[in-house]
Amino acid sequence: MHRTIRAAVCSVAVAGLAFGLSSCSEAVDQVDKAVDETYEVTYEVTGKNVDSIEFHGGGGKATEPKIESVSKPELPWTKTVKLRGIMPAAVMPVAADPEGAQVACKITYKGKVLEEQSAKGLVTAGGCTAESPVTG
């Protein structure tokens, strides 16, 4: 009697393990697909006397994006970039003006605003960071 119960329990455990591994494999496949998928965003920066703009331009690793920079940009400034997988979209305008700096940034994806910020002050860094739409 105990052997029959033990054999049944072992069979159920093996079946559960096989099912769990196939589910895990499917989850890994979905993560791999998301990491390899690309998406485009458009950065927009407006304001007054912006000294520089730093942004994720698509280089580097998804978890360690390469930061690109533009000095003394002509405003309004826009740039469309292709990012990969879980890489967040990010743009950081920096302005310093004794009379009061002004900056605003916006990140759009397929016409939808993902993030929008603005700031004023003597020294202003008004950054926008948005989660990858691939993850959501």
Image (spheres, rainbow, N blue to C red):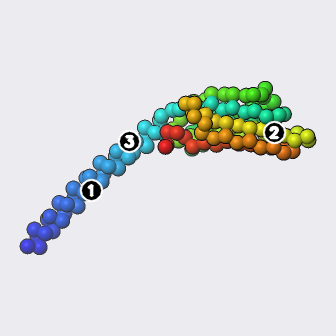
Q: Can see residue 69?
A: no
Which of the two discs, 3 and 1, labels the residue nearer the N terminus? Answer: 1
Q: Which mark is residue 29?
A: 3
Mark 1 belongs to which amino acid? Answer: Leu
SS at badge 2: strand
Mark 3 belongs to which amino acid? Answer: Asp
SS at badge 3: helix
Seen at 77% across and 28% down, the residue is: 75
Q: How far apart are the alpha carbons under marks 2 and 3?
A: 45 Å
**Which residue is farthest bottom?**
2
Seen at 69% across and 28% down, the residue is: 78
Seen at 84% across and 34% down, the residue is: 49
SS at badge 1: helix
Residue topped by disc 2: 102
Q: How far apart are the alpha carbons under marks 2 and 1?
A: 59 Å
Q: Which mark is residue 17?
A: 1
- Does the residue at mark 3 contact the one at mark 1 (Cβ under 8 Å)? no
